[in-house]
Image: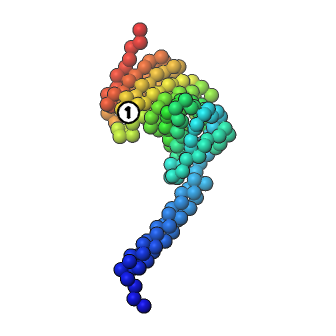
Amino acid sequence: MKFSRIDNTLIGFFILVFISSIYLLVVVQNNQEHVSQALEIGTIKEVNNSVKKRHYTMLTWHNAAVTDALQEDDVIFTSENSSALLMFNDGSLLNIEGDSLIRLKGEHGIILEKGQIQINNEQSSDPSKLTITLAQKNNQKLTMGENSIFKLSKNNDNIEINSIKGNGSLSSQDNTSEIKNGQNFNIEKNKIKKINLS
């Protein structure tokens, strides 16, 4: 039996779709297995308006709900006029304001992609381990001291850090700056500036 050029093209197309479907199925199953084995690091305590959650390896977003478990590599997105309160296993609290995107990295890490967050480690059983990655390119990180509350805001390359209570340190590939109680810092285009408030 001879096939026309159109028939051969269609057969080739369907074979390609079949192989792609099998590949995607295997990838999704592997990702789901990875998610099911991921370490639980906390729970969602409050959700206001539209808050979405997904695992870093998954494509689809889900509506976040109170008591949802948090796993390492979860990504949380809050739309405008939305907020979420997360509680980690060590007792630290993370408040995420509207129009923000964060990724939970391991048990004690937060990557602030954009938006505004407030972190409170006053009830933490191990406060010195909590780190917030601000810029992944040059490894800028904020490490909080004990009994601290920090507010952070990131918009494009501009980052503002406010110590509401307690101390911390801001480190990058080049240097480390100590942040004292009540101090404010601004990072613009990777340059760290202390802001003196009058």
Residue of label 1: 156
Residue at 41% x, 31% y: name it: 155
At which x and y percent is residue 167? 49, 22
Within 10 Å of disc 1 (Cα), the crowding (few <14, some 14-19, many 20+) is: few
Q: Is residue 32 left or right of residue 67?
A: left
Identify the residue shown where x is 31% and y is 31%.
189
Q: Quadrant of the C terminus?
A: top left
Q: Residue furthest top?
A: 198
- Farthest bottom residue? 1
From this viewpoint, which residue is outermost toward the right?
A: 67
**Vertical relation: 193 (above or below) 156:** above
Residue beneath the point at 54% across and 40% down: 76
**Could you tell me the amino acid type at mark 1?**
Asn
Query: For residue 83, which quarter of the picture?
Result: top right
Residue 45 in percent (x, y) is at 65, 34
- Is 66 positioned to the left or the right of 15 in the image? right
Residue situated in front as seen by the camera: 37 or 22: 22
Element under label 1?
loop
Residue 40: quadrant of the picture:
top right
* Res. 104 in view: no
The answer to whether residue 90 is above or below residue 72 is above
Q: Residue at x 40, y 85 (%)?
A: 3
Residue 158: x %, y % from top left: 37, 29
Q: Is residue 70 above or below residue 179?
A: below
